[in-house]
Amino acid sequence: MATYGCARMTVSKAMTALVEAGLIVRRKRAGSFVARPRVHAPVLNIPDIQATILARGEAYAFRLLARTTRRPSDDDERALAADGGLLALEGVHEAGGRPFALERRLVSLTAAPEMASADFAEKPPGAWLLEHVAWTEAESRISAVNADARDARLLALDDGAACLVVERRTWREGLGVTRVRQIFPGEAYDLVARFGPGA
């Protein structure tokens, strides 16, 4: 108001317009903040989060939180693992030094045995798989959740914040490759698909 010499109502209307345009995020009892840039990803593609963030000109990092090799524990995991074990990974993708996505991934060591010794300092698990293991079939499920206390802490969000969840499975000629669950802050990601007749 002081800078532009206008009324409080005018500033409020301008801020509301910025919120509607997705440029400002308002949080109760915290204030108004510049929104994170949205990543647009095709619904029917498997995006490389690292490449997407670097293409936006932001610094990228992957912080590995947990890594274990184990036997499958249920029928769904046995179908993924085939006759081998599973590599279970949990980590956070960061963009510009801020959490961008929380990832929990299971990888079939039958389909990708070299991944057991892969170093994810340079390439995160998803990018590693896209580079080393060809897939022939994929299934994606998209949903919305409210972040629980642990996920909110890892994503630097308020408890119960709205998040977008992308769950994906891939196969190579019927053999399971990976199952991943990625949780994105709701304001940071949207999904785009373009369709046409006969396409």
Image (cartoon, rainbow, N blue to C red):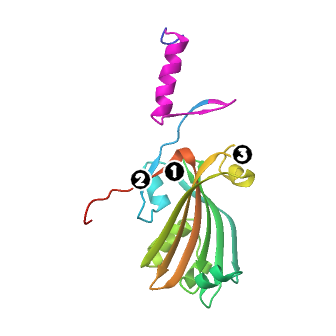
Residue carrying label 2:
55
* Residue at horizontal 44 percent and vertical 77 percent from the top: 137
Given residues 155 and 76, the one toward you in this image is 76
SS class, disc 2? helix
* Residue sitting farthest toward the front: 197
Given residues 122 and 108, the one toward you in this image is 108
Q: Quadrant of the C terminus?
A: bottom left
- The percent position of residue 172, horizontal first and vertical second, equals 46, 82
Amino acid at pointer 2: Ala
- 7 sits left or right of 75 in the view: left
Give the distance between the C-alpha atoms of the residues marked 1 and 2, in whole angstroms.
10 Å
- 34 sits left or right of 88 in the view: left
- 21 sits left or right of 146 in the view: left
Quarter occupied by residue 110: bottom right
Amino acid at pointer 1: Ala
Residue carrying label 1:
59
Start-end of magenta stretch: 6-31
Mark 1 or mark 3: whose residue is earlier in sequence: 1
SS class, disc 3? loop
* Residue sitting farthest toward the bottom: 83
Amino acid at pointer 3: Asp
* Residue at horizontal 50 percent and vertical 75 percent from the top: 170
10 is within the stretch colored magenta: yes
Q: Which of marks 1 and 2 is in front?
A: 2
Residue carrying label 3:
159
